[in-house]
Image (cartoon, grey):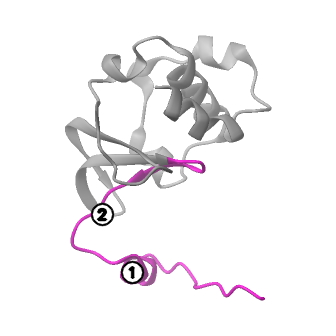
Amino acid sequence: MRRLGRCLAPLVLLATPAMAEDFDPASLDLAALIECRADVPAYNGFALWLAGEPGAVGKLGWKEVAAGNPFLVQYELPTKIRAFGRETTSIVFSATGPMAVLDGVAAPDLARELDVPATTRST
Protein backbone atom coordinates (compact mmCIF):
# COMPACT_ATOMS: atom_id res chain seq x y z
CA MET A 1 0.00 0.00 0.00
CA ARG A 2 2.92 2.35 0.61
CA ARG A 3 3.94 1.94 -3.03
CA LEU A 4 0.47 2.99 -4.12
CA GLY A 5 0.64 6.01 -1.83
CA ARG A 6 3.91 7.08 -3.44
CA CYS A 7 2.32 6.74 -6.89
CA LEU A 8 -0.66 8.88 -5.95
CA ALA A 9 1.16 11.47 -3.85
CA PRO A 10 2.07 13.84 -6.70
CA LEU A 11 -1.54 13.94 -7.82
CA VAL A 12 -3.08 14.93 -4.54
CA LEU A 13 -0.69 17.44 -3.05
CA LEU A 14 -3.23 20.24 -3.27
CA ALA A 15 -6.19 18.17 -2.11
CA THR A 16 -7.64 18.54 1.35
CA PRO A 17 -8.13 15.72 3.87
CA ALA A 18 -11.86 16.44 3.84
CA MET A 19 -12.00 15.07 0.29
CA ALA A 20 -10.88 11.66 1.55
CA GLU A 21 -13.42 11.72 4.36
CA ASP A 22 -16.21 12.48 1.90
CA PHE A 23 -15.32 9.63 -0.46
CA ASP A 24 -17.77 6.74 -0.64
CA PRO A 25 -16.18 3.58 -2.15
CA ALA A 26 -19.59 2.60 -3.54
CA SER A 27 -19.44 5.71 -5.75
CA LEU A 28 -16.22 4.64 -7.47
CA ASP A 29 -16.44 4.78 -11.25
CA LEU A 30 -13.05 3.30 -12.07
CA ALA A 31 -13.62 3.43 -15.82
CA ALA A 32 -14.31 7.18 -15.59
CA LEU A 33 -11.03 7.67 -13.74
CA ILE A 34 -9.10 5.61 -16.30
CA GLU A 35 -10.73 7.36 -19.26
CA CYS A 36 -10.20 10.82 -17.69
CA ARG A 37 -13.95 11.47 -17.55
CA ALA A 38 -13.98 12.05 -13.77
CA ASP A 39 -13.57 15.53 -12.38
CA VAL A 40 -10.61 16.51 -10.23
CA PRO A 41 -12.47 16.51 -6.88
CA ALA A 42 -13.79 12.98 -7.56
CA TYR A 43 -10.31 11.77 -8.44
CA ASN A 44 -8.66 13.49 -5.49
CA GLY A 45 -11.23 12.11 -3.05
CA PHE A 46 -10.64 8.61 -4.34
CA ALA A 47 -6.84 8.97 -4.40
CA LEU A 48 -6.68 10.33 -0.86
CA TRP A 49 -9.04 7.64 0.42
CA LEU A 50 -7.14 4.86 -1.34
CA ALA A 51 -3.74 6.07 -0.10
CA GLY A 52 -4.88 6.83 3.45
CA GLU A 53 -7.66 4.39 4.34
CA PRO A 54 -6.36 1.28 6.10
CA GLY A 55 -7.41 -1.79 4.11
CA ALA A 56 -8.82 0.28 1.22
CA VAL A 57 -7.63 -2.13 -1.46
CA GLY A 58 -9.26 -5.04 0.36
CA LYS A 59 -12.49 -3.09 0.80
CA LEU A 60 -12.63 -2.73 -2.97
CA GLY A 61 -11.94 -6.44 -3.43
CA TRP A 62 -8.74 -5.75 -5.35
CA LYS A 63 -5.74 -8.11 -5.16
CA GLU A 64 -2.22 -6.82 -5.74
CA VAL A 65 -0.23 -8.83 -8.26
CA ALA A 66 3.37 -8.57 -9.40
CA ALA A 67 3.59 -5.83 -12.01
CA GLY A 68 7.07 -6.67 -13.22
CA ASN A 69 7.79 -2.93 -13.24
CA PRO A 70 9.01 -1.00 -10.18
CA PHE A 71 7.12 2.10 -11.31
CA LEU A 72 3.69 0.41 -11.37
CA VAL A 73 1.40 -1.18 -8.82
CA GLN A 74 -0.92 -3.75 -10.42
CA TYR A 75 -4.26 -5.08 -9.18
CA GLU A 76 -6.70 -7.74 -10.29
CA LEU A 77 -10.30 -6.61 -9.88
CA PRO A 78 -13.12 -8.81 -8.61
CA THR A 79 -15.25 -7.96 -11.65
CA LYS A 80 -14.58 -6.71 -15.16
CA ILE A 81 -14.62 -3.04 -16.00
CA ARG A 82 -15.09 -1.59 -19.44
CA ALA A 83 -12.62 1.10 -20.50
CA PHE A 84 -12.02 2.43 -23.98
CA GLY A 85 -14.48 -0.10 -25.39
CA ARG A 86 -12.65 -3.11 -23.95
CA GLU A 87 -13.09 -5.23 -20.85
CA THR A 88 -10.42 -5.98 -18.30
CA THR A 89 -9.98 -7.16 -14.75
CA SER A 90 -6.46 -5.79 -14.47
CA ILE A 91 -5.40 -2.22 -13.68
CA VAL A 92 -2.15 -0.52 -12.79
CA PHE A 93 -1.32 2.69 -11.00
CA SER A 94 1.57 4.81 -12.15
CA ALA A 95 2.69 8.20 -10.90
CA THR A 96 0.06 9.73 -13.17
CA GLY A 97 -2.91 7.65 -12.04
CA PRO A 98 -4.86 4.50 -12.88
CA MET A 99 -4.58 2.72 -16.20
CA ALA A 100 -6.38 -0.30 -17.61
CA VAL A 101 -4.31 -3.28 -18.72
CA LEU A 102 -5.72 -4.11 -22.13
CA ASP A 103 -4.58 -7.28 -23.86
CA GLY A 104 -4.65 -7.65 -27.61
CA VAL A 105 -4.30 -4.01 -28.58
CA ALA A 106 -1.18 -1.92 -29.10
CA ALA A 107 -1.11 1.59 -27.66
CA PRO A 108 -0.66 3.28 -31.07
CA ASP A 109 -3.61 1.34 -32.48
CA LEU A 110 -5.84 2.28 -29.55
CA ALA A 111 -4.76 5.93 -29.85
CA ARG A 112 -5.76 5.95 -33.53
CA GLU A 113 -9.06 4.26 -32.68
CA LEU A 114 -9.78 6.90 -30.03
CA ASP A 115 -8.58 9.69 -32.34
CA VAL A 116 -5.82 10.70 -29.93
CA PRO A 117 -3.24 12.64 -31.92
CA ALA A 118 0.36 11.55 -31.79
CA THR A 119 2.76 14.01 -30.22
CA THR A 120 6.38 14.50 -30.98
CA ARG A 121 9.05 15.34 -28.51
CA SER A 122 11.54 18.03 -29.44
CA THR A 123 15.11 17.38 -28.42
* Residue 44 image-quadrant placement: top right
Mark 2 vs 1: CB contact within 8 A: yes
* Residue drawn at the location 39% of the way across and 13% of the way down: 55
Circle 1 crowding by C-alpha within 10 Å: few under 14, some 14–19, many from 20: few
| Predominant secondary structure, magenta span | loop
Q: In this figure, which residue is indicated by the disc labeled 2? A: 85
Q: Is residue 39 above or below residue 35?
A: above
Q: Which residues are magenta?
A: 94-123
Whether 86 is among the magenta residues is: no
- Side of 42 where 53 appears, left or right: left
| Percent position of residue 18, x then y | 70, 13
User: Given the image, on which type of amino acid does mark 1 rest?
Assistant: Glu
* Residue 20 image-quadrant placement: top right
The secondary structure type at the circle numbered 2 is loop
Disc number placed over residue 113 in the picture, else none:
1
The secondary structure type at the circle numbered 1 is helix
Q: Identify which residue, 24 or 95, lies in the foreground.
A: 95
* Residue drawn at the location 53% of the way across and 78% of the way down: 116
| Percent position of residue 62, x then y | 29, 29
* Residue 19 image-quadrant placement: top right
User: Given the image, on which type of amino acid does mark 2 rest?
Assistant: Gly
Circle 2 crowding by C-alpha within 10 Å: few under 14, some 14–19, many from 20: few
Q: How far, Cα to Cα, is label 2 from label 1?
A: 10 Å
- Side of 113 where 48 appears, left or right: right
Give the mark, 2 or 1, whose residue is nearer the N terminus: 2
Quadrant location of the C terminus in the rendered image: bottom right
Disc number placed over residue 47 in the picture, else none:
none
